[in-house]
Amino acid sequence: MTFGTMKHLKILHKISFLLLAFSFAIPAYAINENSTKLELPALLALFAQQKKSTVDFNEEKHAFFLDEPMKSSGYIEFSAPNKLNKYIIKPEITSQKITGNILEIKSPSESHTIDLNDHPEFSVLLQSIISVLSGDIVSLKKDFKINFTNATSDWTMLLTPHDSYIAGYIESIEMFGNKNMLSRIIVTEPNKDRSITFLSNHR
């Protein structure tokens, strides 16, 4: 695997912070079986009912300077209203914890604390993702254009940022789900690098 320049690594590292929020799903309450489609307000209402949850993830990061995707796996915990804890088990044990605007990163060899207020492009994006998890459609619409499509039980939510500065980092976030389970998230950058997160074992 070729890791490219230090600049590329720093960009990829920053993007990994964002994926703490992107790679999480909430198992909500059961949907009315008589309903053939789940509309966006109803979906977010289901998210709003779940205050705590845990989900396993497998993640692939595709970048133009990598010969093959970088892979990681572990689990993520969410606690309303604004706590996201990501525990990476492979390839190296690492924790990434967000409470409000504070990000704490710990590995066996080092730890860092980052104030996301110093990175508004990330803070706004993270808050928007937390808005999905907490079912806050007002905050979500403030920062993103939402394109929601649904079939009988499958749905897709495409988020594109309103702000041109944020769009310089993230082109889109695409979420896929079936009824009340989020199964996959694709984060695409302007240069078409992307991260794909598969979610399973919701609990």
Image (tube, helix red, strand yellow):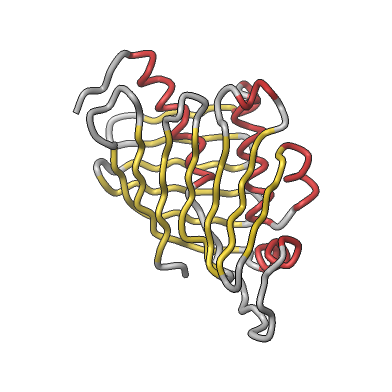
Q: Position of residue 171 (x, y in %)?
A: 57, 32
Q: Position of residue 59 (x, y in %)?
A: 36, 46
42 displayed left or right of 118: right
124 displayed left or right of 58: right
- The quadrant in which residue 5 appears is top left
Image: 5 above or below 90: above
Outermost residue toward the left? 1
Residue at x 29% of width, y 49% of height: 89
Q: Which residue is nearer to you in this view: 175 or 78?
A: 175
Q: Position of residue 184 (x, y in %)?
A: 46, 55
Quadrant location of the N terminus in the rendered image? top left
Outermost residue toward the bottom? 34
Residue at x 39% of width, y 30% of height: 111
Q: Position of residue 199 (x, y in %)?
A: 42, 58
Q: Which residue is nearer to you in this view: 47 or 147?
A: 147
Residue at x 54% of width, y 52% of height: 175
